[in-house]
């Protein structure tokens, strides 16, 4: 069975149907990102950070309930976007 990181949200249908969209490391596959799946990380103080793909590049976007959008970085490669996304730890 694939182990997912605790900070990675999965769809409500559980581990069996969506397993093909995750790598063994717990990251979403490039195909899943292209299909609209989004990596989400919840941080303290009602802050969320997302990693998503829009067809041309990969984006890491962060928002706060109190301050609105506070960061939006775009990357040409998925490894670079994942590296930046991983810097946001709860």
Image (cartoon, rainbow, N blue to C red):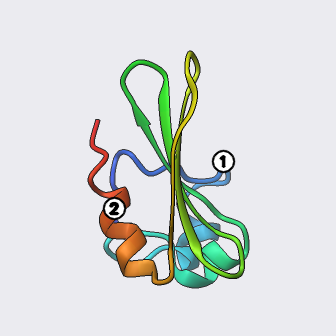
Q: Identify residue for label 1.
A: 12
Residue behind mark 2: 84
4 vs 18: above or below: above
In the picture, the quarter occupied by the N terminus is bottom left
- Location of residue 65 with respect to 8 vertically, above or below: above
**Residue 38, disc:** none
Image coordinates of residue 30 in percent, x first then y, are 55, 82
Q: Position of residue 64 (x, y in %)?
A: 53, 26
Going 55% across and 21% down the picture, which residue do you hit?
A: 67
User: Residue shown at 59%/55% (left/top)?
Assistant: 14
Neighbour tally class for label 2: few under 14, some 14-19, many 20 plus, Cα within 10 Å: some
Q: Relative to 54, does residue 14 appear above or below in the rendering?
A: above
Q: Quadrant of the C terminus?
A: top left
Give the CA distance from mark 2 to mark 1.
27 Å
Q: Position of residue 44 (x, y in %)?
A: 36, 23
Helix, strand or loop at disc 2?
Answer: helix
Q: Work out whether mark 2 precedes mark 1 in sequence or the reverse, and give the earlier one.
A: 1
Closer to us: 55 or 72: 72
One can see residue 4 in this view: no
- Quarter holding residue 5: bottom left
């Amino acid at each position: 069975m694939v182990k997912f990181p605790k900070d990675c949200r999965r769809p409500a249908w559980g581990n069996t149907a969506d397993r093909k969209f995750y790598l063994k490391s717990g990251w979403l596959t490039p195909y899943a990102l292209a299909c609209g799946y989004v990596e989400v990380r919840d941080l303290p103080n009602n802050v969320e950070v997302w990693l998503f793909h829009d067809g041309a590049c990969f984006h890491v976007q962060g928002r706060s309930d109190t301050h609105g959008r506070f960061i939006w970085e775009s990357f040409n490669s998925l490894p670079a976007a994942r590296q930046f996304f991983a810097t946001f730890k709860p």
